[in-house]
Amino acid sequence: MKKLFAAWNRLGLITQIVIGLCIGILLAWLAPDKAAGISLFGTLFVSALKAIAPLMVFVLVMAAICQHKDGQKTNMKTVIILYAVVASNLFPTTLVLAKTKQDITPPSGLVEVLNNVLNNVVDNPVNAIVNANFLGVLAWSAIIGLALRAAAPGTKNVIKDFSDAITVCVRWVIRFAPLGVMGLVFNAISTSGFKALATYGRLICVLVGTMFFVALVVNPLIVFIAGRINPYPLVFKCLRVSGVTAFFTRSSAANIPVNMELCEDLGLDESTYPISIPLGATINMAGAAVTIAIMSLAACHTMHITVSLPSAVILVFLAAVSAAGASGVAGGSLLLIPLACSLFGLPADISMQVVGVGFIVGVIQDSCETGLNSSTDVLLTATAELYNNRKNGIRKTLNYK
């Protein structure tokens, strides 16, 4: 048993999730009458996510803000999220979720949405964490983080250590994703049939298609506007060197050495990329923002909630802010979906089931998301240098080969 456990731990998380997915499908086909026992794994996994997510958002966002130094600039591209919103409305996707006893009343309009946002923002911070009020959690974590920017270095180190500890706890929870996925897939197929798999396939197509659109259309357009050059040699090199590696490692942080070497190979300014690459690995989460927006809108379509354009714009803002606080572990962005779902009055029971679905499709989605995130870090660093060179009349050619 010990050797079997050691062999299991040597497998990557993505391999483990695939195994859990296959076992869940087989059990739903061969032993559908055992639903209560197998589904328990999915229930426990979702409950653990519900428990850790509010605390994770509070601590990680607070730590990131209090550690920020004046003069540091970021390359957050909220315009990318607009394409995620457009794609979700062009291809509305519904999910197969467990039934809930809660009655969900969708917001009647923008005024009610804004009223809900403001009321949730000023909620008691302890109450916000206990009741998973993610808007309140985000607001108070940002306020406390700003207040702590003037704290002593020792205090900031303690907060950073606590943030690192929460990240470790999140990793522990995610290690149970294979069992959780097995239970969730078993429950979905045993209650709704194999049509649930078709739903997951459609969701993957929308997610991955949007990310490819960002990588091959939006990013090249930004490079062209800023640098006035043919963007595709640079885009393809970033995707080939950084994106492919990040696709398999599924970690922007683990891909930092690869990006640093790529920046050196491109001939970028050595005073810029040692700062921009680690910073981008933390907060430049274009792929995460796409995931958060599309999954939240899929939840709204599932619960028959109509999302107006003004509400979608607010979702854009929340998705961008949420993406900046995405955890540095595989699947970390999925834990921020409830923050966006709360905008439309979706309870934690529903939003956490959406997170569970995210782990099911994450076998493909998370790899593509990380590839987009990491390759964009280098691309934006190079684009900023191209723009400054053009603005200052400096002629410098980057090495695209």
Image (cartoon, rainbow, N blue to C red):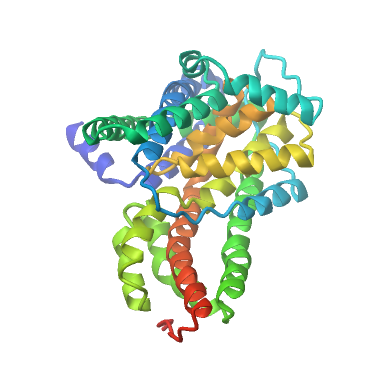
As displayed, is residue 13 above or below residue 401?
Answer: above
Between 348 and 339, the residue placed more toward the observer is 339
Image spot of residue 278 (x, y percent): 34, 55
Q: Position of residue 218 (x, y in %)?
A: 62, 64
The answer to whether any part of residue 296 appears in the image is yes
- In the rendered structure, the answer to whether residue 123 lies left or right of residue 100 reads left
Q: Position of residue 82 (x, y in %)?
A: 68, 51
Residue 11 at x, y percent in the picture:
30, 46
Residue 105 shown left or right of residue 336 in the figure: right
326 or 43: which is nearer to us?
Answer: 326
Image-quadrant location for residue 270 = bottom left
Quarter containing the N terminus? top left
- Relative placement, left or right, of 67 versus 222 is left
Report whether residue 239 is seen: no
Count the numbered circles shown.
0
Where on the picture, by quarter, is residue 351?
Answer: top right
Where, by quadrant of the figure, is residue 301 drawn?
A: top right
Q: Residue at x 47, y 52 (%)?
A: 284
